[in-house]
Amino acid sequence: MAKIMIQGTGSSVGKSVITAALLRIFHQDGYKVVPYKSQNMSNNSFVTVEGDEMGRAQVLQAYAAKIRPHCIMNPILIKPSGDVNAQLIVNGKVEGNFSASEYDKMKPKFRKMIKEQIEELESEYDIVVIEGAGSPAEINLRKNDIVNMGLATMMNCPVVLIGDIDKGGVFASIYGTVKLLAKEEQDLIKGTIINKFRGDVNLLLPGIKQIEELISKENLGVIPYYYFDVEEEDGVAIYKKEITNAIDIAVIRLPHLSNHSDFEALKYEEDVSTRFVRNASELGSPDILILPGSKNTIFDLEWIKSTGLFDKINELDKTIIFGICGGYQMLGEEIFDELHIEGKTSYIKGFDKIPMKTEMEPVKVTVQVSGNLTEDENIKIYGYEIHMGRSIFTKNVDNLFIMNNRENEGYVSEDEKTYGTYVHGVFDSPSFRQLFLNSIRRKKGIAEKDSVDYEVIREESLDKLADIVRENVDIDKIYEIMGVK
């Protein structure tokens, strides 16, 4: 059936969000639609019902299309674990750890897989919306490209090019991107969209007219600057450093922080400030300190010690400390990596706040989970686990959760000042988030509040995003480009 590809003049120009908007628009118009991104680089991942791992951006796009996320929507996921090496996920499973040059040599073997997957999706859906990565004009990466123009030419797929005017230089970036492409690649670009515009669009029209003449490509619309109120691929950047509300939550911004989406739901608590902390001087005395997930737990714990954060955290006497996944492992007594799964360091001492030892293992746990709070079966939790390590308690402890069809999970100290869990997305549960935050509110003497359902907010935000894009982009022209009446 029909397909279209969204490429950008660079990273963070809005490709993922515009792809999500188009998917929701096409769905609203009665079409059966599906997202696809052949290669994604992100430590913000998700586990499907089948236990496969994929990028969160394509999960959001699946929700926009009103379908269940599946790893075929993001068959190649690159999870950086250092400046050079990364873990490679192929069709939801770990392929291994590779350097950038090693992976580049592997790309040609994935071409057949990608072609067959897109053809399979075309046979099952009315429209496939494909997202590119970064910029198609990175001339050093063109040879083995499988995610931008290399994919578009292989599939003979029409392309819409996105430029971000908020960064400045949008006309130069559009012109340069098009002119660095080969003639057959330029021919696949059927139009451009200017994203994140502020001000009077009439002042932009002379520039649009000139760029259309210079590149012989029609402008399909100008999207006003709009803060998309749901998780983005680089969502950490939107969090403020200031404390602006009554409850102060500090998250350690680890060098290899993973799954920053764990904190999205906290943004919708009106009396909560969630901020990311890089060093000891920024920490202060937060009500809650979160040690988040990490793609390289031992390295990031070494970093915490080198910055002075380790000692500073140990000095906190009133703060509740909450560890998630890698952060949960850090709160234990010791972490062993004798097989060097994560790196060269084979052992490190943890915070010793949880009586637990962790051994890194080559088999990765990827599973969706659900359960309830041990103290109240009405407090439901749900989420997913993604981790390499196996943790064992060194003495009897109080678990945090009773899991469905699994062993009890997590840890809570007797004084309820230390928490830990392997469950990503634990704060997405409104009942658990409400209970946890209301305990803080009571201690601070402020009014208790009901927590909103994050899934409802996500749906409302996707509909609002679709309305804005529909209003400012020539959707009829996009249908025409795809050959859809």
Image (spheres, rainbow, N blue to C red):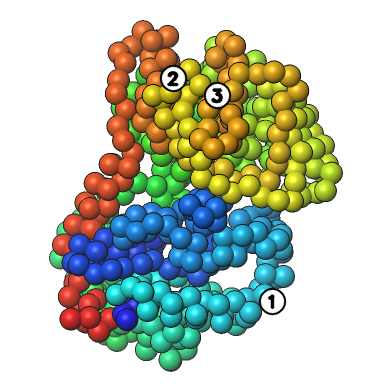
366 or 171: which is nearer to us? 366
Whether residues under marks 3 and 2 lie with C-beta atoms below 8 angstroms apart, the answer is no
Q: Earlier in the sequence, mark 3 or mark 2?
A: 2
* Mark in the foreground, 1 or 3: 3
Look at 29% across and 23% down and name the residue there: 450
Whether residues under marks 1 and 3 lie with C-beta atoms below 8 angstroms apart, the answer is no
The residue indicated by pointer 1 is: 105
55 sits left or right of 8 in the view = right
Figure check: 471 above or below 435: below
Look at 59% across and 49% down and name the residue there: 366
* Circle 2 Cα neighbour tier, 10 Å, few/some/many (<14 / 14–19 / ≥20): few
35 sits left or right of 303 in the view = left
Disc 3 on helix, strand or loop?
loop
380 or 323: which is nearer to us? 380
248 or 349: which is nearer to us? 349
Whether residues under marks 1 and 2 lie with C-beta atoms below 8 angstroms apart, the answer is no
Disc 2 on helix, strand or loop?
strand
Give percent across and percent down for residue 334: 77, 30
The residue indicated by pointer 3 is: 400
Q: Amino acid at mark 3?
A: Leu
Give percent across and percent down for residue 70: 46, 60
Q: Classify residue 274 by image quadrant.
A: top left
Figure check: 158 above or below 413: below
Q: CA distance from mark 1 to mark 3?
A: 45 Å
Give percent across and percent down for residue 474: 19, 72
Q: Amino acid at mark 2?
A: Asp
| Residue 245: assigned label | none
Give percent across and percent down for residue 141: 59, 76
201 sits left or right of 139 in the view = left
Look at 18% across and 57% down and name the residue there: 467
The residue indicated by pointer 2 is: 376
Q: Classify residue 172 by image quadrant.
A: bottom left
